[in-house]
Image (tube, rainbow, N blue to C red):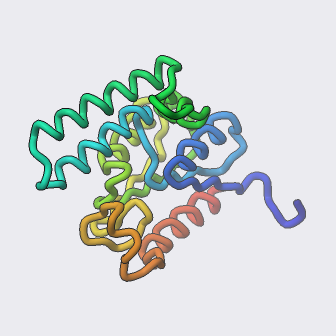
Amino acid sequence: RNGIDPQRIVVIGHSEGASIAAMIAASDPKLAAVVMMAGVAKRGAEVSIEQQEDMLRSDPTMTEAVKQTMREKQKEAVETVLAGGDLPGQKTNAWIREYFAYDPLPTARKVKQPLLILQGERDRQVDQSHAQILATALRDAGNKDVTVKVFPTLNHLFLPSTTGSFSEYSHLQTTKVPDEVLAILTDWVKARIAMK
């Protein structure tokens, strides 16, 4: 397209889009830089178990026996999907199968472009530990320009939150991503583009 410098294109992805941004960067060395926002560092099967465990920890109304039963059912469901089976009463779609099986780290290790990882500390969908796992994998694979920024009060949507839980989403005080996030993102991108 006219007005677009092909040497200065940056891909930004959020959540599953962060994994897709890494896929694009790994296959297109012409990209100038990559931003992964709340990206996963583990297979979706593991993420689903982490999400369930977070939910169980935060629910004081359930007995430990009920929680253990739910853990066993989740583990069985994950194993069924990974083995190519369907869950009782429903057909498992192709996206779920791919999400559960896909390991983002081998692809992330192929990203050689400058990479910014943004993460909300109160993210309950993708635990903040994923940011450091991604950064370590990239650095260990030789990427010398990996930046991580964790925002203490932000959730998965990069919005201010009290707990970060799904139940908060419908009544958050704002749906505007804080200026601090946008400033860090744009300053980082501008600095990487200036080097081109």
Residue 81 vertical position relative to residue 122 in the rendered view, above or below: above
Q: Nearer the viewer, residue 161 or 1?
A: 161
Q: Quadrant of residue 154?
A: bottom left
Q: Nearer the viewer, residue 9 or 59?
A: 59
Residue 73 vertical position relative to residue 58 in the rendered view, above or below: above
Residue 66: percent from the left, percent from the top?
16, 40
Residue 95: percent from the left, percent from the top?
59, 37
Q: Quadrant of residue 30?
A: top right
Q: Residue at x 45, y 29 (%)?
A: 88
**Left or right of 105, for residue 62:** left
Residue 108: percent from the left, percent from the top?
51, 35
Q: Residue at x 61, y 32 (%)?
A: 94
- Asked whether residue 107 appears in the rendered view, the answer is no
- Asked whether residue 148 appears in the rendered view, the answer is yes
Q: Residue furthest bottom?
A: 173
Q: Residue at x 37, y 47 (%)?
A: 131
Q: Residue at x 38, y 57 (%)?
A: 119
Q: Nearer the viewer, residue 108 or 158?
A: 158
**Left or right of 4, for residue 42:** left
